Image: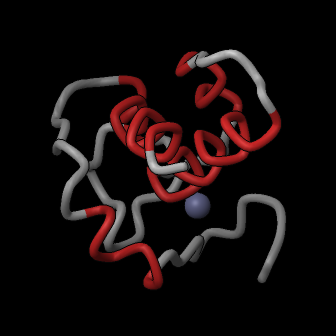
Amino acid sequence: MIRGGDMSCNHSDLESVMERVESYQGGGQRHICAGCAYLLGQKHRANGTKFDPSKVDDLPESQAQPQRHRNAYDAYRIGFDSI
Ligand SMILES: [Zn+2]
């Protein structure tokens, strides 16, 4: 796995998950990588960290498929609830 906001942040393994994330055409978090947001949600649940979708604002941006134009906050919630 390539670390640190690579431009081709590719979460092809999360494709079926990303299909469940609501699409988002507004400003702000649509540019944040929804794949990373999903993984952050899982990590927070696993670590016992409090549910806090605003933490996705610190994640790298990605417009790569399949997470393109997905709502990163929704992805975070799905990740958090998946454990
Ligand atoms: Zn990513």
Residue at screen point 34% across, 73% down: 65
Image coordinates for residue 51, horizontal then vertical, percent: 59, 18
Give the residue at x 18% y 42%: 22
Is residue 8 toward the left or the right of residue 26 in the image?
Answer: right
Query: Relative to 6, is 32 on the left or the right?
Result: left
Pick the front one: 18 or 51: 51
Quadrant observed for ligand 1 in the rendered image: bottom right
10 in relation to 52, above or below? below
Q: Position of residue 73 (x, y in %)?
A: 41, 29
Q: Nearer the viewer, residue 38 or 4?
A: 38
Q: Quadrant of the N terminus?
A: bottom right
Which residue is pictured at 49% across the width and 58% down the height?
35
The residue nearer to you, when weighing 51 against 12, is 51
Its colouring scheme is: secondary structure
Q: Is residue 65 above or below residue 30?
A: below
Taking the image as shown, residue 8 lies to the left or right of residue 67, namely right
User: Where is residue 20, by image quadrant?
Assistant: bottom left
In the rendering, at what x and y percent does residue 54 appear?
Answer: 57, 16
Please give the name of the residue rendered at 70% of the width and 30% of the height, measured from the top-left corner.
Answer: 58
Quarter occupied by residue 78? top left
Number of numbered discs: 0
The picture places residue 25, in percent across and down from the top left corner, at 16, 36
